Image (spheres, grey):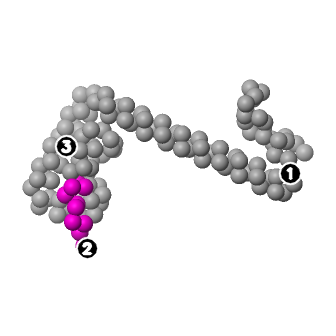
């Protein structure tokens, strides 16, 4: 397997992201090896990366045990969650718009099936009998 020349920089960056809370989930040597596209043995042979991994792993264990998370990490996690929700919302809106376009192309009035989103008369999607 051909190694990326900058795998050490990538490994340092990933470990820093874990420590700062930008990456959540378990930190494993296999996962780090997969993200850096090198073998676990290559990671383990490098003294600097091995000690950085151990320090980061110990830090994450202490944070987990204490039950406290860094405030910045929590804010970042919530911002990431908000961004995902916004993206999902936009995708759903695009799906509804596309469905309305297809209905119009088939000579079906989409207003019979979709209420106006600006009214407060119930849900946005309402199926009506023909």
- What's the mark number on residue 56? 3
| Mark before the other along the chain sequence, 2 or 1 | 2
Q: Which residue sits at x=25%, y=66%?
A: 4
Residue 108 is tagged as 1
Q: Quadrant of residue 123?
A: top right
Residue pointed to by mark 2: 1
CA gap between label 2 and label 1 equals 56 Å
Residue ID at (74%, 39%):
125
Q: Nearer the viewer, mark 2 or mark 1?
A: 1
Numbered disc in front, either 3 or 1:
1
Q: Is residue 9 one of those drawn in magenta?
A: yes
Report, in whole angstroms, how far the alpha carbon at label 3 lies from the one at label 2: 27 Å
Vertical position of residue 47 compared to residue 69: above or below: below
The magenta-colored residue range is 1-11
N-terminal-most mark, 3 or 1: 3
**Residue 36, image quadrant:** bottom left
């Amino acid at each position: 397997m051909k190694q990326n020349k900058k795998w050490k920089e990538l490994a340092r960056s990933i470990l820093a992201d874990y420590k700062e809370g930008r990456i959540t989930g378990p930190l494993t040597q296999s996962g780090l090896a997969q993200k850096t596209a090198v073998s676990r043995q290559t990671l383990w042979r490098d003294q600097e990366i091995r000690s950085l991994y151990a320090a980061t792993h110990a830090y994450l264990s202490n944070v987990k045990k204490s039950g406290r998370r860094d405030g910045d990490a929590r804010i970042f996690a919530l911002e990431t969650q908000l961004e995902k929700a916004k993206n999902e919302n936009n995708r759903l809106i695009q799906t509804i718009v596309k469905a309305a376009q297809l209905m119009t192309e088939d000579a079906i009035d989409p207003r019979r099936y979709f209420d106006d989103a600006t009214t407060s008369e119930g849900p946005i999607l309402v199926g009506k009998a023909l």
